[in-house]
Amino acid sequence: MKKKAIAGTLMAFALVFLVSCSQTIDNLAPRVTITSPTNNSQVSGTISVNVNASDESGIARIELYVNSTKVSENTQSPCTFILNTTSLNDGFYTLRVIAYDVAGNKNEAHVTVYILNEGTPKWKFQTNGIYFSSPAIGNDGTIYVGSGDGYLYAVNPNGTPSWRFRTWSSVFSSPAVGPDGTIYVGSEDHCLYAVNPDGTEKWRFETGWRIYSSPAIADDGTIYVGSENGYLYAINQDGTEKWRFDANIAPTFITSSPAVGIDGTIYVGAIFDYLYAINPNGTLKWKFYVGELVYITSSPAIGADGTVYIGTYKDSLGYLYAVNPEGTQKWKFETGGGITSSPAIGRDGTIYVGARDNYLYAINPNGTLKWRFLTGWYVQSSPAVGSDGTIYVGSDDGYLYAINPDGSLKWMFRTDSSITSSATVGPDGIIYIGSVDGYLYAVYSSSLGLANSSWPKFRRNLKNTGNVRQWKTGLRAEMDTRN
């Protein structure tokens, strides 16, 4: 009996021992590594952070931190975190991952990266040559641009094609987007086209000669565009002619793009001699003489006080004119080369314009030089001013330049050919610009949209309407009170 009791005790002890051995405490940390990006690498845009973690008891979760901020979590291993870096300022950052096993043990790994987004490409979209056409942006973010291959392209915000619309010759004109989403653009085939948002033709209006001018859109929906036959056309929304204004006092062309003032006056330059101000009913308001056989291919910009700014050239001489709303000269500024670029205006009233002496000029509102910035060749591209005051302009040397408000270089982005197209700045900071190399480029910047000014870019706003009244900031209300 006593032997049986001892045996039972030994059996119970053995059972307890076996159970206790099977419940060994796990105090080993998991193994974790970041396989990409590599330490001390430079990154931009949206990146993949690839992580590999392992543990005998299993991985419970992996957390991703940027510096000390947790940004994401995953329960799988290996795993990939997608990190959009465009909201971060350029500089050094620590990417840190912490892996937890099912027992609560943890381990971490980290890499240091340099985030550099400004001046780096988000994407590029291929056409067969973007010359002077400058992109417009629709309400849904679609980017529209014309090409030398005769097509109007619609490009999605991610750089993929939406559609293309065929004209019968090169498209140098810049598209404008109407309030209902209709896209208006001119072609060398003599026609102004109205294109539906789905890429189908709405109507076309034939002028009888080539169109290099870009359309402007009035508050009532009237479309204004110039033609090489010397006429400025006013076209109704249904594609019928409203009126035409004859600038053929001498044989002339209109390649300048019209601008619509606060009172509806239309301003446009002619190849020879004159800047015209035309009433909304098509009658002449005034004309301003710039000199015999002086070219105006530059397009007007309108200041907050109604001053009209326009560039001219003859031979190697260029002037930027400031013209009062009643048609008298306010001042003129001489550049070292002809001006085919169109002026833009900063928030403080500074006027920016390029010239064929390779400089971008910054001119004070009183007509004196503020600074000038030297590029590698002609500046025929028109500047755009970002919300932070950065000025973006292309050059025939193939570079897109970002210039600080004090005239110093911020960054430069290289394309493979001349840039005569003009930039626009999306609300997300993406710069869109075309190059003669055939690509539409999307480039990261720190400017979240355009400057709050009366005319921050060629064709005034994201939709390229060329209308000083059509912007959604406090400055609009300020100007409207002057009526």
Image: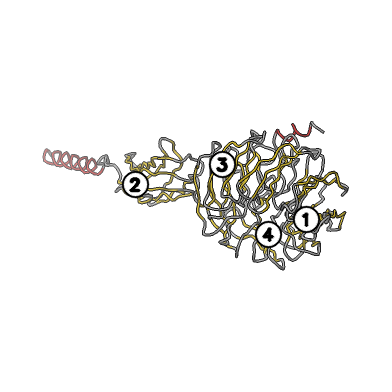
Is residue 131 left or right of 205 when viewed as pictured?
Answer: left
Colour theme: secondary structure
Mark 1, residue position: 226
The percent coordinates of residue 142 (x first, y second) are 65, 53
Please identify, in this view, whether the residue under mark 1 or under mark 2 is nearer the observer: 1
| Secondary element type, mark 4 | loop
Residue count near mark 2 (Cα–Cα under 10 Å), binned few <14, some 14–19, many ≥20: some
Residue ID at (68%, 45%) = 461
Q: Which disc, if any, is residue 372?
A: 3
- Tell me the distance, in whole angstroms, between the alpha carbons under discs 1 and 4: 13 Å
Number of other residues with Cα within 10 Å of mark 1, as a class: few under 14, some 14 to 19, many 20 or more: many
In which image quadrant can residue 473 be found?
Answer: top right
Instruction: Residue type at mark 2: give it.
Output: Asn
Q: Amino acid at mark 1?
A: Gly
Q: Earlier in the sequence, mark 1 or mark 2?
A: 2
Residue 344 position in % (x across, y down)? 65, 43
Between the residue at mark 2 and the residue at mark 4, the CA separation in whole angstroms equals: 46 Å
Labels 2 and 4: the sequence-earlier one: 2
Which amino acid type corresponds to the residue marked 4 in the rendered image? Phe
Q: Horizontally, is 95 left or right of 126 in the view?
A: left
Residue found at the very far bottom of the displayed protein: 168
Q: Nearer the viewer, mark 3 or mark 1?
A: 3
Q: Which residue is mark 2?
A: 39
- Going from N to C along the chain, the mark reached first, 2 or 3, is 2
Q: Name the residue type under label 3.
A: Arg
With 350 as the anchor, is 47 left or right in this view? left
Residue found 38% across the figure and 52% down from its top: 78
Q: Are marks 3 and 1 in contact (CB under 8 Å)?
A: no
Q: CA distance from mark 3 to mark 1?
A: 31 Å
Kindly state the secondary structure of the residue where label 2 is placed.
Answer: loop
- From the image, tell me which residue sits under label 4: 172
